[in-house]
Amino acid sequence: MKKIVSGLLLTTLALTGVTPTADASKRVDDLMARMTLDEKIGQLNQLTGWGDNDAMKGQIRAGQVGSLLNEVDPVVVNKLQKVAVEESRLGIPLVFARDVIHGFKTIFPLPIGQASTWNPELVRQASAIAADEASSTGVRWTFSPMLDIARDARWGRIAEGYGEDPYLTSVMGVATVEGYQGDDLSNPSTMAACAKHFAGYGFVEGGLDYNASWIPDNLMHEVILPPFKQAVDAGAATVMSSFNDINGVPPSGNKWLLTDLLRKEWSFKGMTVSDWNSIGMMVLGGYAADLSDAAAKAISAGLDMDMESHAYLPNLKKLVEEGKVSMADIDSAVRYVLEFKERLGLFDNPYVDMKTANRFFSPGSLQAATRAVEESVILLKNEGNILPLERKNIKIAVVGPMADNRHDQNGTWSFDMVKDRTVTPLTSLREIYGDRNVSYTQALRHTRDRSTEDFADAVNAASEADVVIAFVGEEAVLSGEAHCRTDLTLPGAQSALLKVLHDTGKPVVAVYMTGRPMVITEDLPNCDAILYSYHPGTMGGPGLANIISGKANPSGHLPTVLARTTGQMPLYYGHRMTGRPAPENPILINDLELEAGQTSTGCTAFYLDAGFGPLFPFGYGLSYTTFSYDHPQLSASHMDKDGSLTATCRVTNTGSREGATVAQLYVRDIVGSTTRPVRELKGFEKITLKPGESREVSFKLTPADLAFWRNGAMTPEPGAFDLWITTDSASGDPVRFTLD
Ligand code: GLC
């Protein structure tokens, strides 16, 4: 693991102090000793709070609520908190929570877009801004980062994570935790992180949300768990159990996951929370006979807080009295809840400071959000270097349903965004090039619109312009939770729109704004340039316009593959070689002769109608300049079992414009006691180089970085390895070394 992450981890551990101080422990001990069983169970109950109402106040006053989610009015927060602190018997404060997934009021690119920046420092900054804004309303706990590895883009929640790779996800997850929590979580402008959804949710069968997931041990330990372990080691305050079931056992009732692994093996000292009604879902899913049985299974598995299942409050007392649930399990959960509140400083500082409440949209936040968009945009194609459009007197035809769409530009999970503060690409392009030089034809009412009746207007606008910029993609509702799709191509008539624009003969720049990696195979020949972005948020306009005009040089790289067809899903770069790898140019379906013989296409692993591999590889991204990567050099050709080796590579900006590239370190274990991926990302560094400038990047590898799941543990295995330092997962020439 690259030094920067381990160094940050050590710093974070020392600073965040996941273990409570002596005074905090004493206060918790004192409270525990005085709490009734009802009051203990009340602390395990999280409800969605909507406003200042007597029913909610009554429950709080009776000590039946430990946390509220979704209340974001600081006046109401303080009112409800006052009831808890001054009117309940023990005065235990509430913790207020919200899904702050990619910004609170200042909306940043979707997490998958933030991953596309390959810049953890920027992600840390975005998270710190989100925490400052949210905490100024009383929200001190967010249900983020989502660390689910996703390799099936049919799953709508791929939008909320950091892509297909465990290393990239780990680095971004740690940066997000550190951004939210800062150096001291008792600082009222910080926010507790929640590593979710624990675990394996991204592997729901068929990319269908809430579905079962079948996860062998090596996939679990090599791919799914590492980002969660890194987040826990970085001091994440909470962990959320997920909706899927793991080989038949739902995480919300999974003792191996929540206790044996998380508590005993990882020594997690924070608090666990269910997902929304995920305890209750065990009844419908056939894992619990009724809500009481589900409550018993959950608390016994080690699930501390019940989010909106209404399972703990009405059932746990009777279960304890019947001996079906131990008091030790109740006390353990309550202690984690109280220690969590201590760590947040809520006992000493429970109220929102109304003098500094509602801190939103600072110039610094908007600037950071603009930079995040600039660094998240991926340049996939730039035929004839049509981009950037540096001539200011150029005539531009802006076309498409995502060009001026202040709602959908913010993407999924942006509950608190302010539509009127959202700046669209049309607005920003007109600011740069002048209203008279930028025409606008929406052409489609929304991204699902199949009507072509306005295409003529778009064609006319194109014919009067020097260049067309088509903004296409998905509405926000087409990705995110419960929004899965079996067709990853552009919805509606958007691809047809790109075709008619292409047929005008004018240069076409396509800008995608989506919630997921889409299939753009059909569009590729109709676009001279393609900028791919994930819903960019509040400053999507300035960020994209700065890229288009050349004020910023694109430096985004894909955090997942882009498939050729939906039918390839799941698809990812770290696949196995198989014993029959596809040839470079397999015979495809349209090349088949009539009555072709059964073995005429060869017997190897490829689709007749899609070949093998993605349209664009993981890690791919172009720039307005070019870079060269020298062959990697190794400090040694052998690594002994207690040693390490350093790989270096000289990278040069061979173009005429300053730009950033992401040097990526991959390894391949040539032979293993189980088959191994053809490549695994083990390090990366984003570097900015001036024209002609060269710099050496270096990565330190140890045997632990080469470990995989064998004999019941993550252990390295001697043998030969290939190593690349390159600019994406499909390029570069390897150098070989041996682990002795
Ligand atoms: C949702 C999501 C989870 C979210 C929670 C609270 O169903 O699965 O990610 O944090 O409920 O809104």
Image (cartoon, rainbow, N blue to C red):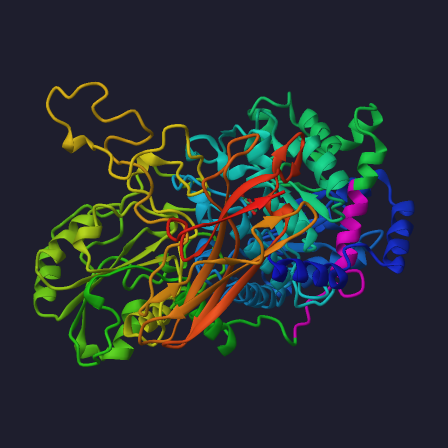
| Residue 65 location (% of width, % of height) | 72, 47
Indicate which quadrant contains ligand 1: top right
Q: Quadrant of residue 465?
A: bottom left
Q: Which residues are magenta?
A: 333-354
| Identity of the residue drawn at 75% across and 53% down | 340
Q: Does residue 362 lie above or below 590 as drawn?
A: below
Q: Nearer the viewer, residue 521 or 56?
A: 521
Asked if residue 6 can be seen in this view, the reply is yes
| Residue 628 location (% of width, % of height) | 37, 65
- Residue that sits furthest to the front in the current view: 637
| Identity of the residue drawn at 21% across and 32% down | 587
Q: Nearer the viewer, residue 279 or 389?
A: 389
Q: Nearer the viewer, residue 463 or 49?
A: 463
479 in magenta: no
Asked if residue 84 can be seen in this view, the reply is no
| Residue 325 location (% of width, % of height) | 79, 28
